[in-house]
Image: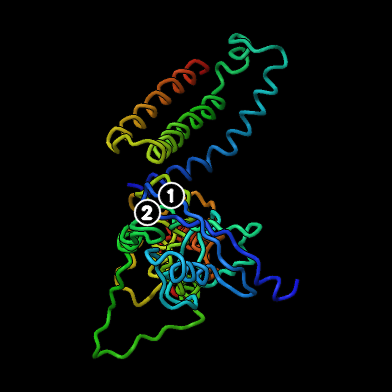
Amino acid sequence: MERTLFLAQRISAIILGPLVLVHLGLILFAVRNGLSGAEILSRTQGSISWSVFYGLFVLSITVHAPIGLRNILQEWTRVSQRTINIIALLFALIFLALGLRAVVAIV
Amino acid sequence: MNKIQRETQELTVRIWRGKEDGKLVTYQVMSRENQTILDIITEIQRFHEPSLAYRFSCRVGVCGSCAMTVNGRPRWTCRTHVKKVSDEGILTIEPLRNLPRIKDLVCDLAPFIDTWQRAGAPFSGTKTRKDAPALVDPNSSTRRAAEAGLQCINCAVCYSACDVVNWNRNYIGPAGLNRAWTLVNDVRHSNRKQTFDQAFGKGGCGSCHSHGNCTRHCPIELNPSESIAGLKQIAFKGLPKDV
């Protein structure tokens, strides 16, 4: 289990690296005319490639961030392992739900 | 400064007395041309404080018994010269960090020794006494990797220096994982996979933050950080092949 999570976090980090760079570049590009929902949707809506890009982004974060959160809770709190696993899983579900909702909106 | 002047100077030595709820007690000791921290502690025990408890054995850096915290850093006291670590004539000597205190400068090493077992440390051979000794090529990659970590003297300096151990007592720590690394590279060991699985289990090498305090403080200049990094790489690449 620990080894699987270790590998999952590293592999998701490898995927996230370039995605984050593109995402940051996109933000700089996108805010030229002010940042509004309508402005963003006018550029992204209907784009399959951006949907795939952010879909992969969301899935990677869903794997990566909760494992990191689990490690932090293990190291810095005295909460039981079972509770920590549940908290990490809940965060994963929240990231997945919020992220996919946003991705669906731009399709 | 001539020799007579130096011998008339005094060192201020603050030593931890008691258990967890103890306190630092100050002693004045003559400063000499050539003395180690262990020399100082022995002098205090013999001439100032007969009830002072501390551990030592070989006095020459082989046995790993005399490690303590000196001016905030874990060190082997028998090979640490006062001149090297004295802070303007003041020495503060405490027991090792991250281990339960028994009395004065003596720690209970059981939790540290236990980590060796948890890291899958027991060697399990594949041959019997009737077989010929295994032939191990000293130039093979596995043997060279094992060789780099083999000389550990179990002094617990790395365990004491490690911040991850400090905040997570379930973490196996550098010495145990370094031992696991030597075993997964030992072609004579029958349980290499099991050793690796244990070293990568709960509190295993995945918990290491690569701070490098173990490597920085190891008195015999081993590199447990590299051993732990090697274990992490096995998760991706599989057990090392003997080439």
Mark 2 vs 1, N-terminal side: 2
Depth check, front residue: A18 or B207: B207
Q: CA distance from mark 2 to mark 1?
A: 7 Å
Depth check, front residue: A92 or B169: B169
Q: Is residue B236 visible?
A: no
Residue A55, position as x, y percentages in the image: 48, 28
> As displayed, is residue B75 above or below residue A31?
below
Question: In the rendered structure, are the residues bearing label 2 and label 1 in contact, judged by CB atoms less than 8 Å apart?
Answer: yes
Residue A26, position as x, y percentages in the image: 65, 25
Is B214 positioned to the left or the right of B33 in the image?
Answer: left
- Image mark 1: chain: B
Residue type pointed to by label 1: Lys
State the residue position of label 1.
B23
> As displayed, is residue B127 above or below residue B202?
below
Residue B18: assigned label: 2
Quadrant containing the N terminus of chain B in the rendered view: bottom right
